[in-house]
Amino acid sequence: MDMTKMLLNILIPPVALIMLLLILPPYLVLKYLGLVRGFTYSEDVAGKVVLITGASSGIGEHIAYQYARRGARLALVARREDRLREVASEARKMGSPDVLQIRADVSKVEDCKRFVDETIEHFGQLDHLVNNAGIPGVGLLEETTNISDLTSVVDINFWGSVYGTYFAAPYLRKSHGKIIVISSAAGRFHSPGASIYGASKAALISLYESLRIEFGSDIGITIVIPGLVKSEMTTGKRRSKAKLQSIPIESTEDCAKAIVDSACRGDRYLVEPSWVWILFLVKVLFPEVLEWCLHWLFFSTPRNSRKAA
Ligand SMILES: NC(=O)c1ccc[n+]([C@@H]2O[C@H](COP(=O)([O-])OP(=O)(O)OC[C@H]3O[C@@H](n4cnc5c(N)ncnc54)[C@H](OP(=O)(O)O)[C@@H]3O)[C@@H](O)[C@H]2O)c1
Ligand SMILES: *[C@@H]1O[C@H](CO)[C@@H](O)[C@H](O)[C@H]1NC(C)=O
């Protein structure tokens, strides 16, 4: 038994490596051809039905405007009805032929069933589902006063996407539609002070990687990994002045345009802005050095400026 195990440990890696090296060149050629197609092909979403969660502000609001400019019909979901109304009227002005506003909390299963049902009742179809609603979760785990407060981050960021996807899937299969999911660089690049938020976003990546396989070619999935983007999450009262100010921040319009362009191309992933991927490489190549640097950066700042996060 031990002998076979040892033999396998010695044999499998080099054999696998040789096979990978043989397969890699033709694979890269095919992938490159796929990319060329991506630059020339873009789905025409005029008249199609797009449901966006978290459309009352920030990235979701601007995704709505991008789809509106392309002539898509919209179902906008969030909790603040007054803000939704303003976004809906702006979207109509920008060219959307029909906009539906639905007040709902994505962390509630019954709300998610209702917003999908209402969308189908009104439009009769669903083509793109944009799972964007999310809340930040900042602070050190040990400094959290009420641990139960943290469950809402996962309930909204993770379960809020699962529920909507579950109820929309039959309609998306029928239309050969797409799911666009807004994860975060924090789901790949682990940083202090956002552990639960990062975990909720990493869980999204894992979830949709599996669903890609379950849905096959019936439903396309674009996983979006934004860096820092201007929104209510990163400005205003929630902003961590000490740390966020030193990091370049992308405009909400640019980010939303990149997301909708990417969805229409049918990309599997979008890292936006694209330079952020270099952080993931650093993480893979020098994990210990990075951990040490982040620890030093975070804990060498005065305690009260950290608390401002
Ligand atoms: N800004 C960034 O730097 C950044 C970076 C990476 C990823 N992201 C992700 O991008 C997404 C959009 O965030 P944002 O930056 O645009 O922040 P934002 O301006 O705060 O927008 C969040 C949106 O989600 C909605 N929302 C929150 N909880 C909800 C709930 N329980 N039910 C329904 N809707 C809910 C909010 O609307 P109501 O409050 O009206 O419900 C709002 O429309 C989030 O998933 C976020 O994690 C942002
Ligand atoms: C802790 O948070 C939970 C959920 O937010 C809440 O239901 C509970 O009442 C809170 N407990 C205390 C002691 O504040």
Image (tube, helix red, strand yellow):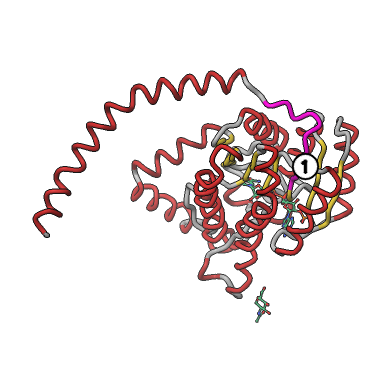
Q: Crowding at label 1, few (<14), some or many (≥20) Cα neighbours within 10 Å?
A: some
> x, y percentage for residue 182?
62, 45
Instruction: Indicate left or right for 3 with 74 as reference.
Output: left
| Quadrant assignment for ligand 2 | bottom right
Front residue of this view, candidates 36 and 218: 218
Query: Is residue 97 positioned above or below 126 on the image?
Result: above
> x, y percentage for residue 158?
60, 57
Query: Is residue 174 positioned above or below 103 on the image?
Result: above
Count of numbered marks? 1
> x, y percentage for residue 303?
54, 63
Q: Which residue is mark 1?
A: 125
Query: Is residue 173 positioned above or below 162 on the image?
Result: above
Q: Quadrant of the N terminus?
A: bottom left
Q: Is residue 88 magenta?
A: no
Chain part drawn in magenta: 43-52
Front residue of this view, candidates 295 and 195: 195
In which image quadrant can residue 166 be found? bottom right
- Residue flagged by tag 1: what amino acid is it? Gln
Our reading of the magenta stretch's main secondary structure is loop
In which image quadrant can residue 10 be found? top left
Residue, x 51% and y 23% (percent of image)? 34
Q: Which residue sits furthest left? A: 3
> x, y percentage for residue 18?
22, 31
Residue, x 45% and y 35% (percent of image)? 278
Front residue of this view, candidates 68 and 227: 68
